Image (cartoon, rainbow, N blue to C red):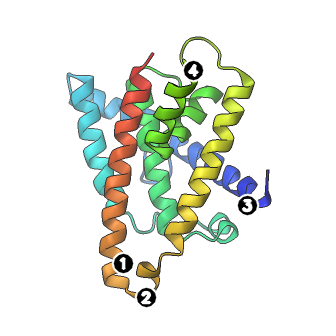
Amino acid sequence: MSSTNQQFSELLDYLFDKAKDGLGAFESASVLAQSYRNDYNNINDAIEALIRNETWKATCSGFISGLGGWFTSIVLLPTNLVSVLFIQIRLVATIAILKGHDITSFNTKWIILGCLCGNLLSSLLKNKSISLFAGKVGVVAINNLNKLVIKQLSTKLIVQSTSSFTKFIPILGGVISGGMDYYATKGIGETAVTIFSGR
């Protein structure tokens, strides 16, 4: 694994742990899941509301206190992109819990992170005919998923961070960036519903 990919892997581990355990005012995925269970009688309604609310948080996220620092400097990502990534990971982890999955499982962790690749994960599972929830996933399969996620996300985030819009046209860049975060987060949530419903 290249140095850059290794750094992204460490970043994903760090953000996943924060999503799992909570960060400041942001409660853990399990606490968030329980909150939605309490507010809605139907799990599907709860997940729909969750996606809607977290999508707007991602759109308006900006800076989340406690994220960034040396990770942001190492991988050359603006803090707002890392913040959105944290929200997206926590969203998917919460959906996984609401669908009855154990997010402390190593395999489930990488499936959660795989959802950040959107429809690409669905296509991979369909083409490979892998049933991720039918017993223990093979080491080779999960390692391949690990590499795919890191490669796709590192490319995607570096492209976003070097966008000319955000560098040279701040107001327009902010609008475009917010729109991209909105649709990306919504799509990731929908992918997670599909993936974690396929038990």
Badge nearest the viewer, 3 or 4: 4
* For the residues bearing labels 2 and 4, Cβ distance under 8 angstroms: no
Q: Residue at x 44, y 58 (%)?
A: 84
In the rendered image, residue 22, in percent from the top left (x then y), is placed at 50, 45
Q: Residue at x 32, y 54 (%)?
A: 183
Q: Residue 36's image quarter?
A: top left
Asked whether residue 195 is in view, the answer is yes
Amino acid type, callout 2: Phe
Q: Which of marks 1 and 3 is nearer the N terminus?
A: 3
Crowding at dot 3, Cα within 10 Å, few <14 / some 14-19 / many 20+, comes out as some
Q: Which numbered circle lies on residue 130? A: 4
Q: Tell me where residue 100 appears, x and y as whole percent.
A: 43, 19
Choose top left, top right, bottom left or bottom right for residue 157. Answer: bottom right
Compare marks 2 and 4 and give the one earlier in the sequence: 4
The residue that disc 2 covers is 168
**What's the distance in space between the residues labelled 2 and 4, CA to CA?**
44 Å
Q: Tag 4's secondary structure?
A: loop
Which secondary structure lies at badge 3? helix
Crowd tier of the residue under label 4, counting other residues whose Cα lies within 10 Å: few below 14, some 14–19, many 20 or above: few
Comes first in the chain, label 3 or label 4: 3
Q: In this view, does 24 lie above or below 167?
A: above
From the viewer's perspective, tell me whether residue 189 is left or right of residue 142: left
Q: How far apart are marks 1 and 4 (CA)?
A: 39 Å
- Pick the front one: 23 or 191: 191
* Residue that label 3 marks: 4
* Mark 4 residue type: Ile
State if disc 2 and disc 1 touch (CB < 8 Å): yes
Q: In which quarter of the image is the C terminus?
A: top left
